[in-house]
Amino acid sequence: MRLSVNIDHVATLRNARGGDHPCPIAAAHAALAAGADGITFHLREDRRHIRDADVRRLFAEVPTRLNFEMAATEEMVALCGALRPAACCLVPEKRAELTTEGGLDIAAGGIGLRRSIGLLAEAGIEVSLFIEPDPATVALARAYGAQAVELHTGRYAEAAEAALRARELARIRAAAEAAAAAGLACHAGHGLTYATVGAIAASPGIAEVSIGHFLIGAALMEGLPTAVAHMRAAIAAGLRERPPLAAAAARG
């Protein structure tokens, strides 16, 4: 399982005071040196954290799998198509939200979303849609031409009760199996921590997790290299519990 580290909130901290410190590009290098497999960043319309100059530096200075999170706007599609990252993830975006609040409403995107996916795919970019963990939504993502889905894990990660967490995990696993059956790559992210990532890593079919806020917060106490190594260890422990996808499907 790949670990893609989201560096947005390094930029948030920098922007709170201005200047150049802490540097999200330096954080990307540190995360990769500690065992991350790629870097995720979200260039928002309001540029509240990552900025255009950060994006240019990432592409110039950080040779790794870059995952460009973005709204499906003309501006972002044109920029991403010109830069050609390995992957992009189309997400819903509202100016008033603190963070992405849920999965993309694919049906509401209509022809415009289909066109964005097509343009990005033609540029050789793996296009993922950030969605709720629901097999019907997975099928719709496939019909719209996406090559991957990223399952929203927020409700699972934030569940206070064990029974609710178990139900949300079951939804994630069902959606991951649906993605595999549809021929889609399956990723997961939002709200994951050391304590919650293991069950996601143990879920057949999920190839990548994207984690940012928790890791940057943990880095304040233990340093980013240690936090990334700790997360890698939690993922590895979960992977040891993962059954083959075929075996999981047979049980279900």
Image: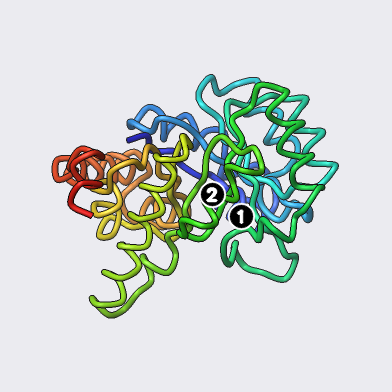
Q: Nearer the viewer, residue 99 or 34?
A: 99
Number of marks in the image? Answer: 2
Q: Is residue 159 above or below residue 38?
A: below
The residue lying furthest to the right in this view is 74
Q: Give the percent coordinates (x, y) of residue 117.
A: 71, 38
The residue lying furthest to the bottom in this view is 161
Colour scheme = rainbow
* Label 2: element kind: helix
Who's the residue at 44% across and 44% down the image?
Answer: 179
Quadrant of residue 131 within the rendered picture: bottom right
Give the residue pinned by disc 1. Answer: 12
Question: Relative to 126, is 55 on the left or the right?
Answer: right
Who's the residue at 31% across and 78% down the image?
Answer: 160
Cα distance, mark 2 to mark 1? 35 Å
Who's the residue at 30% across and 62% down the image?
Answer: 170
Report the amino acid beneath label 2: Ala
For the N terminus, give its image quadrant. Answer: top left
